[in-house]
Image (cartoon, coloured by chain):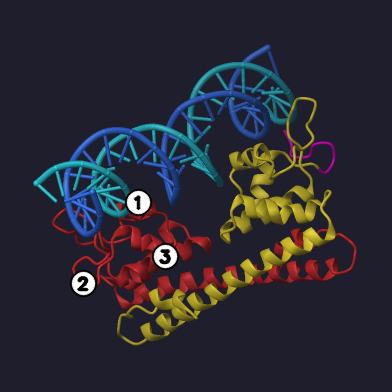
Chain colours: A red, B yellow, C blue, D cyan
Amino acid sequence: MTDHVSGSGLLRAELARRTGCNLETIRYYEKIGMMPDPPRTPAGYRVYDPDHILRLRFILRARELGFSIEEIRGLLDLVDGGDQTCVEVKERTERHLADVRAKIADLRRIEKALSATAARCSGEAVPECAVLETLEGP
Amino acid sequence: MTDHVSGSGLLRAELARRTGCNLETIRYYEKIGMMPDPPRTPAGYRVYDPDHILRLRFILRARELGFSIEEIRGLLDLVDGGDQTCVEVKERTERHLADVRAKIADLRRIEKALSATAARCSGEAVPECAVLETLEGP
DNA sequence: GTAAGGTCTGTAGCAACTACAGGCTCAAGA
DNA sequence: TCTTGAGCCTGTAGTTGCTACAGACCTTAC
């Protein structure tokens, strides 16, 4: 079987390959409504298009950044539009923004501690405990 | 029962309260070796000190930032010392550093997309799909 | 001394995947 | 053509990382 189904569509394995996602996880995300039900071939095979790649990559990376499924659902709702008012979108966007900025701040602290550790390690001493104190900041 | 066990020690519930951690999760982290086995009272109650608070807060925040248990174990090994050589520590530190910097970069993209969304939303239009394209970067 | 509440252990349940079993589909080669 | 083999389907079971509960013990307050 080729991967070219009705022109530009991808089958599930090809979507998995292009996103680095586990094959079964795609089906799981469809089941819980994170990924839309894709069109099917007459035989029932799922057929994906480039938008699906974009969406799945976003979900995967957001997970790696520590967003829960529900948080990602919230971010995706911003994309999917729907019947939300502009005010609602704005409020939710700003909540997400605060969360994202807090994560960035914490990661910066970890970055600082790690690079200090690496620098000190260029000498001969094993570092003390800069890492643990990292997230104690203001 | 007070929370003052043998001077400055904390019982499990107090550690949970001060870190925001679920009570049972503390026991779980002990079981999988992320938290050290704490000393006990004669009756078998766990007694924690301020270092435990620090360590647990670090674990919790690292989880929120998307680090897996194994990755956090790696970060904590840097703290715990042990028989690792300086070169090993440095290599592992730099791998973590690369990972942290990639996360920061992605979060910055998300931040940008979200603040653009919020700004556009101050007008009247519902945003299109700036968010999804966020993690497509270079 | 007894009632209330905190701690203990072990075990069961949930969320988010991940893997497998058994069956159907399709393209290609003998 | 027909068969072989890789890929897809569904449903279900297993894994990881927690979270909640049950039943028993301990401690403080009345």
Amino acid type at image mark 2: Gly
Neighbours of disc 1 within 10 Å: few (<14), some (14-19), many (20+)? few
Disc number placed over residue A28 in the picture, else none? 1
Residue A26 shown left or right of residue A45 in the figure:
right
**The residue positioned farthest toward the bottom in the image shown:** B123
Residue B82 locus on image (x, y percent): 83, 49
Label 2 vs label 1: CA separation? Answer: 26 Å
In the image, residue A44 above or below residue B30: below
The residue identified by callout 2 is A7
- What residue span does the magenta drawing correspond to? B1-8
Residue A84 shown left or right of residue B11 in the figure:
left
The residue identified by callout 3 is A19
Is tag 2's residue or tag 1's residue first in the polypeptide sequence?
A: 2
Residue B111 locus on image (x, y percent): 50, 77
Residue B110 shown left or right of residue D12 in the figure:
right
* Circle nearer the viewer, 3 or 1: 3
Is tag 2's residue or tag 3's residue first in the polypeptide sequence?
A: 2
Front one among A101 and C19: C19
Amino acid type at image mark 1: Tyr
Please give the chain letter of the residue carrying mark 2: A
